[in-house]
Image: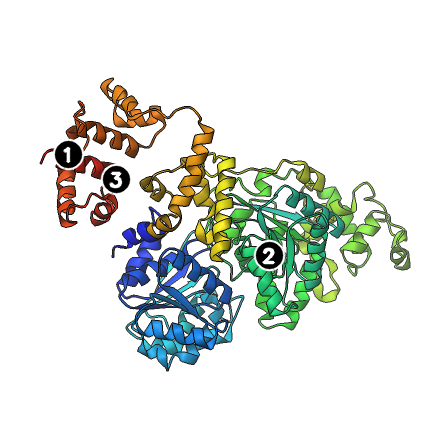
Amino acid sequence: MNPHTLLRNVFGYDEFRPLQQEIINRTLAGKDSFVLMPTGGGKSMCFQIPALCFDGITIIVSPLISLMKDQVQALQSNGVKADFFNSSISPQAENDVIARAINGEIKLLYLSPEKLISVSNSWLKKLNIKLVAIDEAHCVSMWGHDFRPGYTKLKAFRNSLPEVPFMALTATADKSARIDIEKQLGLKDSKLFISSFDRKNLSIEVRGQVPKKYKLQEIGRFVDQKKNESGIIYCLSRKNTEEVADYLKSYGHSVAYYHAGMNPEDREQVQTAFIHDDTKIIVATIAFGMGIDKSNVRWVIHYNLPKNLEGYYQEIGRAGRDGLPSETRLYYNMSDFVMYSQFADDGANSTMQKEKLNRMLQFAEAKSCRRRILLSYFGEHLTKDCGNCDVCDNPPKDFDGTVLAQKALSGIARMKEKEGITMLINVLRGSNNAEVHAGGYSQIKTYGVGKDISYIDWRDYIIQLANQGLIEIMYSEGSALKISPIGWKVLKGQQSIKLTLPIHAEEKISRKPKVMKMADEEEANTDLFTELKKLRSFISKEKNVPAYVIFSDKSLKQMAIDMPVTENQFLGISGVGMNKMEQYGEEFMEVIRKFKTLAKPKKTPTILDTFVMYKEGLTPEEIAAKRDLQITTIYSHLSQLYAEGREVELEKLVSKVVVDKVRVAFNQLDRAIALKPIFEMLNEEVSYGEIRMSLTLILKNE
């Protein structure tokens, strides 16, 4: 079947996203591909559509049991024969899956790498495998951020199927990891497809050096503004996840924590409640979310600095997968950085891990457009600032910071480059701290020269000096500050520098939350959207599947804008395929019809009003616009009027070529007067309105 027809009929989308069609065509030609697409960028469609085109089975390797379940449920809701085979199913269920796979009753089969290797020489050999997709492919590389030994055995599986196309997919892989992935998986002449990593719908904000007490208060205020929206808060430690969750719970929020210290049953329960929208907020360590395809996460907060930009990007990418505006916020303190540095010292690839951590800190400390920095890390370069990050919203104000820098540098020099940031600030501010006196620092010339500047602002300025290369933070020497050659020049008055004014917490918080609207987004009726969500929730509980598997928020929003009440109109909604139309269409349209009746109590104009306007010389398009009706409805009116013998020149509204095409299809379908079969037979190239008018002309003129 044609890939575009499958996209429309099965998945309910009119257009492929960039690169998808090219990847699909290459796969159908039997060639290997390496797909690098951001989270929410449409990776799954790249192998799901070819899987439906091939006459055999497609194997998908995934390390994430919960994601397998999610994707299989989503496929099944679209009428696709899909299943999974992993450690979560019973022996009886295993036998059932094996039997159906061998009998050709499954089109897509998801397996964990461990399960795949264990069965690769038994029943898997009996399958007619036409495609193998390896998801989360970065797990095969030691250079990736989530190495899994099970993936290293996939090369042998690849070699056992030399004629079958393989597709590796990942959302995060730098250049060294990409080369390694192709080698480890044994891909042959594969083509690398790199999609844009620019998720325009995500706003980016970074908040530095916020004390814990204020951080919790800020997060509390943020969440208060997000009533009934799903969000994730990522924490560095298990203890933090519990503290933050307890804090939000005490203010009445629907929240749960998730970390590796919990037993598997509890973790599964927490994740399921979140997927089904029963719990709105999850506070978790980074282990959470990889296996979740939840499309309506509206915000993500990082409570601590992530250890690399790949992980950070993947985690914020769990917000707004439906394409609707979503917010991300990152908090960090230098203590996070020091802790990760120590972890890196003790771990594998220490030098690389530290380099990635430094890049993460540079991003957090940046005073220029954050999206440009983030995308440049992935090899993509924006030509202008994004306008949807905190730096673009609040451009920093420069000033001559030479004198201020000299005060700090003088303090470092007079303390013989032995002390860290905290001691330096205490000395500059003239603190009576016992450690200051014990070190004899209350006697040096720099003591108290910066008492007019707050502790938090001094910290910001000193980090700026480090970022500009005036000082180095020697983590191997207890984070002692050292002056660089440039720093000595500034101290001696041989060079001047610019600093930027810190943006204070109060200024940031007092700003009204930014409500971002996508360029093509119209205003949805909030009341109708709420009613549609209620119906979706009811159906999802009844079927025991996540709400977004029924319809995404984006689809519901479009329903609340377009208010479809006919089958054709409902199929026009993005994300509505034939199977979903048949399963849920009538119930959702009934809600919309009732809403329209209540919202517009006045009598709906009749078919004769269309006739009056037509006689006045208005085109069908003008009548539709004037009456606020779909063009298909106007064509239906005109067809009916023509059939009744009214003066309507239907022949001028539909071409003879189209009428002839419809006549052929109509005859081949045993002259059954049903629009959908004709629509499908004509490869969806003729609209429902044209089909209706053509049938009217055919039947009237026989």
Disc 2 versus disc 1: nearer the observer: 1
Residue 661 x %, y %: 15, 43
Q: CA–CA distance between discs 2 and 1?
A: 67 Å
3 and 1 marks in contact (CB < 8 Å): no
Three-letter amino acid code of the residue under disc 3: Tyr
Establish if 24 lies above or below 153.
Answer: above
Assign a secondary structure to mark 1: helix
Whole-percent x, y for residue 287 in the image: 58, 64
Kindly identify which residue carries mark 1: 697
The residue shown at (52%, 54%) is 318
Model colouring: rainbow
213 and 614: which is toward the camera: 614
Structural distance between the alpha carbons of marks 3 and 2: 53 Å
Crowding near pointer 1: few (<14 within 10 Å), some, many (20+)? Answer: some
What amino acid is labelled 2 in the image?
Met
Q: Position of residue 357 (x, y in %)?
A: 61, 61
The residue that disc 2 covers is 360
Residue occupying the point 83% across, 47% down: 429
Residue that badge 3 annotates: 688
Q: Amino acid at mark 1?
A: Leu
